[in-house]
Image (cartoon, grey):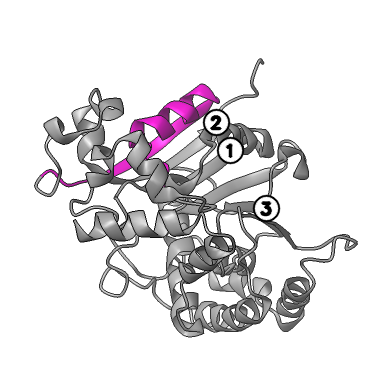
């Protein structure tokens, strides 16, 4: 019950003027630069390796990321892998320029050394898991990679980082939008890959977001996302958040700008199919032993499928099949 009352107290405190922003800022991860760089290096390369395995393009020219948080490391890794433009979208402006410049320098060293992908031993909770964590030479051959990390190119990326909030720039490699509410910020059918890591479980308006992703992506473009469905410590059981009533959940959230949306895996897969995506893979991590009993589910979740109930996370890659209405 400790988790319940702690979350309830935080939710109620967020109604006090000024407290919501303070609580939100405390949730930002303050890991050191080297660890941050290794995390994002691992995330980006895992998504690329899975794209190759699923027969999906591994050389996206334009990459968009939903919910990068304080560090733009995943997008920077994409740029250092050959992408020419990176769009970042967040609900709150977390990105810290000083941190990101230092992360960029660490990432350059990792790519220059062709470091193996940091594995499950270092990052046990990062998905997807891979069969091999060797550096993907087949995706990023040395000759090509060296062209992507020249001093001149890295200097340009660094300069764009330092000036990414300057709306008057043209030809920038990095565009950062926080908060964002208009899918018109990006030209339709201009993005090759949209990536997110443990983010879509926090998105309130999934319909609007998936519609925007569909609009931005080219036909054949890729959505690559890892989504978690745990309670994030808000309940004793990993899926105990599905036992709370709507009123209890509203009080626990309070006025916090971002929380978890409590949507199960099928919701995301349904949106992808509704918006004309072909599912290339949906790798589920399940946990039946640690799950709550079906009889404990709140009213709105009583008809949840057994598969959804025990799905702890899912890694999805999907390609855009067609334009809506075509």
Residue 284 colored in magenta in the image: yes
Give the percent coordinates (x, y) of residue 278: 47, 29
SS for callout 3: loop
Between discs 2 and 3, the one toward the N terminus: 3
Q: Which residue is mark 3?
A: 179
Between discs 1 and 3, the one toward the N terminus: 3
Q: Is residue 89 above or below residue 147?
A: above
Magenta range is 260-288
Residue placed most toward the observer, 15 or 281 = 15
* Numbered circle sitting on residue 209: 1
SS for callout 1: helix
Residue 267 in view here:
yes
**Mark 2, other Cα within 10 Å: few <14 / some 14–19 / many ≥20:** some
Give the percent coordinates (x, y) of residue 242: 27, 39
Residue 49 in view here:
no
* Numbered circle sitting on residue 5: none
Which image quarter: residue 153? bottom right
Residue placed most toward the observer, 31 or 101 = 31
Which residue in the rendered view is the most extreme toward the left? Answer: 289
Q: Is residue 86 above or below residue 250?
A: below
**Mark 1, other Cα within 10 Å: few <14 / some 14–19 / many ≥20:** some
Q: Quadrant of the N terminus?
A: bottom left
Report the residue at 88% width, 60% height from top: 170
Give the percent coordinates (x, y) of residue 306: 19, 30
The answer to whether residue 310 is left or right of residue 65 is left
Q: Quadrant of the C terminus?
A: top right
SS for callout 2: helix
Give the alpha-carbon distance from disc 2 to disc 3, as whole Å. Answer: 17 Å
* Numbered circle sitting on residue 207: 2
Which residue in the rendered view is the most extreme toward the front? Answer: 16
Query: Nearer the viewer's eye, disc 1 or disc 3?
Result: 3
């Amino acid at each position: 019950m400790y988790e319940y009352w702690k979350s309830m107290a935080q939710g109620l405190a967020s109604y006090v003027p000024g407290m919501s922003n303070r609580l939100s800022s405390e949730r930002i991860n303050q890991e050191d630069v080297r660890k941050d760089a290794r995390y994002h290096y691992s995330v980006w390369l895992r998504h690329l390796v899975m794209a190759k395995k699923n027969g999906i393009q591994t050389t996206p020219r334009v990459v968009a990321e939903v919910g990068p948080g304080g560090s733009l490391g995943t997008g920077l890794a994409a740029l250092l892998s050959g992408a020419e433009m990176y769009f970042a979208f967040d609900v709150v402006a977390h990105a810290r320029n000083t941190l990101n410049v230092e992360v960029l320098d660490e990432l350059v060293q990792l790519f220059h050394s062709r470091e193996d992908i940091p594995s499950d031993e270092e990052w046990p909770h990062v998905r997807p898991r891979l069969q091999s964590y060797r550096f993907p030479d087949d995706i990023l051959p040395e000759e090509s990679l060296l062209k992507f990390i020249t001093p001149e190119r890295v200097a340009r990326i660094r300069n764009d980082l330092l000036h990414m909030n300057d709306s008057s720039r043209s030809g920038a490699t990095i565009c950062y939008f926080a908060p964002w509410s208009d899918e018109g910020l990006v030209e339709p059918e201009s993005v090759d890959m949209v990536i997110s890591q443990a983010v879509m479980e926090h998105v309130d308006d999934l319909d609007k977001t998936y519609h925007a992703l569909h609009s931005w992506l080219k036909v054949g473009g890729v959505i690559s996302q890892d989504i978690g469905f745990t309670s994030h410590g808000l309940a004793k059981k990993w899926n105990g958040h599905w036992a709370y009533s709507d009123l209890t959940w509203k009080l626990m959230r309070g006025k916090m700008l971002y929380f978890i949306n409590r949507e199960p895996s099928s919701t995301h897969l349904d949106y992808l199919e509704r918006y004309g995506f072909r599912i290339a893979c949906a790798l589920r991590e399940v946990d039946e032993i640690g799950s709550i009993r079906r009889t404990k589910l709140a009213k709105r979740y009583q008809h949840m499928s057994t598969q959804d109930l025990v799905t702890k996370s899912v890694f999805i890659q999907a390609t855009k099949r067609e334009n809506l209405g075509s």
